[in-house]
Amino acid sequence: MGAPPLDKPSSSALSANSLSEDILLVNAYNPLPEGFYPENLVNLYKQKGRSFQLARADIEISENVYEAMNTMFTAAKTDGAEGFIITSGYRTRDEQNAIFVSTTDGTAAMPGTSEHETGLAFDVTSMENDNFELTSQFKWLSEHCASYGFIIRYPPGGEDITGYPYEPWHYRYVGKEHAETIMASGLTLEEYLEN
């Protein structure tokens, strides 16, 4: 997650704690309310039959997101794309604060403005290459994630709108219908919610 944008986008959809239709918008101008806690978090390590690996045993995510991501990674495995490693999921506000204060390059989101605090986002990598964007796993994921309800939340070229650099490893659950429209159009989530 990167630093907030320098100029606030002009959009009526970007009001505090935006919830347009069923998509929660979280960014520097739409922080989560104090005390926000996502419902139905599950520990990924405890889930049987996972089609992905974990970098740590304490990663949690919302249950519906887990179900969609496991279905997605099962399909990837069927297509010969395997070796996905989830490196991050839900973070508490305190965890996000610790990351924010320890990051000196300005790429960490301020507490309350990170999608990781929603339980709807995860970061992924693979052992194939240190640069995830150059992997066969990324190629598969970028081509198929929308069919399972996920978007690349911080796409290339969207930095001025999202306020974050391109992150090929960061995926956000928005539901299949929204994801397919967003990924096919090349819009950022902010732009999509403006329409």
Image (cartoon, rainbow, N blue to C red):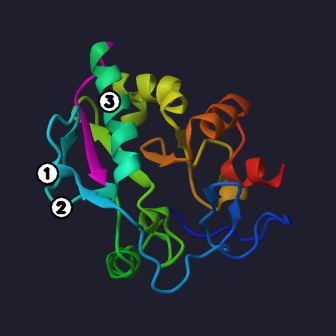
Q: Residue at x 45, y 69 (%)?
A: 105
User: Where in the figure is residue 5, as x and y percent of width and height?
Assistant: 68, 67
Mark sitting on residue 58: 2
Local packing at callout 2 (Cα closer than 10 Å; few below 14, some 14-19, many 20+) is: some
Image vertical order of residue 128 relative to residue 45, above or below = above
Q: State the residue position of label 1.
A: 46
User: Which residue is at the front of the view, 67 or 190?
Assistant: 67
Q: Residue at x 18, y 61 (%)?
A: 58
Amino acid, disc 1: Lys
Local packing at callout 3 (Cα closer than 10 Å; few below 14, some 14-19, many 20+) is: many
User: Where in the figure is residue 163, as x and y percent of width and height?
Assistant: 64, 62
Amino acid, disc 3: Phe
Q: Residue at x 42, y 22 (%)?
A: 140
Secondary structure found at label 3: helix
Q: Is residue 87 magenta?
A: yes
Q: State the residue position of label 3.
A: 73
Q: Residue at x 45, y 85 (%)?
A: 35
Which of the 4 image quarters holds residue 181?
Answer: top right
User: Which residue is at the front of the view, 134 or 68?
Assistant: 68
Tell me which segment is drawn in magenta.
Answer: 79-88
- CA–CA distance between discs 3 and 1? 17 Å
Secondary structure found at label 2: loop
Res. 9 in view: yes
Q: Earlier in the sequence, mark 3 or mark 1?
A: 1
Amino acid, disc 2: Asp
